[in-house]
Amino acid sequence: MTRRKVSMALAVALSAAWAGPVSAQARPEVLVKQRQAAMALQGKYFYPIRSMAQGKTPYDASTVMRNVVYLDALARMPWDGFTPATRDIKSQATPAVFTDTAKFREAQDRFTAEVTRLTELMRKGDEASIRPQIMAVDKSCNSCHDTFRERQ
Amino acid sequence: MTRRKVSMALAVALSAAWAGPVSAQARPEVLVKQRQAAMALQGKYFYPIRSMAQGKTPYDASTVMRNVVYLDALARMPWDGFTPATRDIKSQATPAVFTDTAKFREAQDRFTAEVTRLTELMRKGDEASIRPQIMAVDKSCNSCHDTFRERQ
């Protein structure tokens, strides 16, 4: 493969659209554990930068940079774990995950699109637009959780 | 920040050396959960490509590409979770994690260096060198687990 082809393929691999299943044969319990792992790590790297965007902690550009790079990958990881076979495994997923799949997919796409936009702004180094975009990501998290995650 | 500065800072952010703690105030239980989450996702994305490198499943370049991109981020995520405060939380970490910290750090660095090398080879699209490098990553996983993870 030429270097140019690799770059193009990489762009595809990292696009929100390309989220095919990793291991179709994984046991449902493993799929649930893996998707919960991705969500836990999204929290690890998102909450500190949300706190910065809200002005609750000092803005640190290098932390934002690292965390956004990580989030760009993590944002794409949970979705192939919500297979019908996981429906009866205890988790915080609401029944709507498995009945309103089109709306769930839309919510995933909105979230990954907001994270992609955040990644683009972060690469440009434009702090003034990074802050509100962090809050746009937060909104897309909450919007999905409202319908597809049991209240905690 | 100029675009060039951002690129340089990004390179630093993604280097193995830059692995500062994310949330110093996180409870030990949370730190353990987060580091276990990173390990679980390393498994999700590494085992399928190891199977390809071993010739057990057909080699699929686009899956290798995606998984290596993800692993490049995941490889850097667990380490700030092994704080002394987590020593008494039940996990598979051996006591050596907290007593032989220099050797543990070396093992982490070897692993992240092998993953970084794999990422470089993947970006060049050189399949002939990607396969053995996947096995080099595997070796660095096992080498660390031999000393720092309880036998399963």
Image (cartoon, coloured by chain):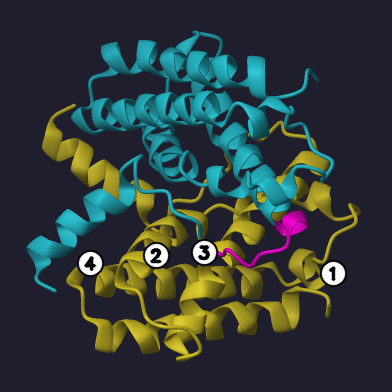
Chain colours: A yellow, B cyan
Task: Judge by depth and name the residue closer to the eye, A115 or B17.
Answer: B17
Q: Is residue A136 visible?
A: no
Residue holding disc 2: A68
Between label 1 and label 3, give the one nearer the viewer. 3
Question: Is residue A4 on the magenta stretch?
Answer: no
Which chain is home to disc 4?
A
Asked if residue A118 lies left or right of residue B125, the reply is: right
Residue type (three-letter) at the residue carrying disc 3: Tyr
Residue holding disc 3: A45
Q: Work out how far the residue at label 4 is from the one at label 3, CA to CA, in angstroms.
A: 17 Å
First in residue order: circle 1 vs circle 4: 1
Q: Quadrant of residue A150?
A: bottom right
Image spot of residue B91 (x, y percent): 79, 38
Residue holding disc 4: A123
Q: Work out how far the residue at label 3 is from the one at label 2, CA to CA, in angstroms.
A: 8 Å
Residue type (three-letter) at the residue carrying disc 1: Pro
Task: Judge by depth and name the residue closer to the eye, A136 or B11.
Answer: B11
Location of residue A122 with respect to B65 vertically, above or below: below
Asked if residue A16 lies left or right of residue B9, the reply is: right
Task: Judge by depth and name the residue closer to the eye, B86 or A28.
Answer: B86
Question: For the image shown, how many numbered marks are present on the structure?
Answer: 4
Residue holding disc 1: A95
Q: Are marks 1 and 4 in contact (CB under 8 Å)?
A: no
First in residue order: circle 2 vs circle 4: 2
Asked if residue B9 lies left or right of residue B52, the reply is: left
Residue type (three-letter) at the residue carrying disc 2: Val
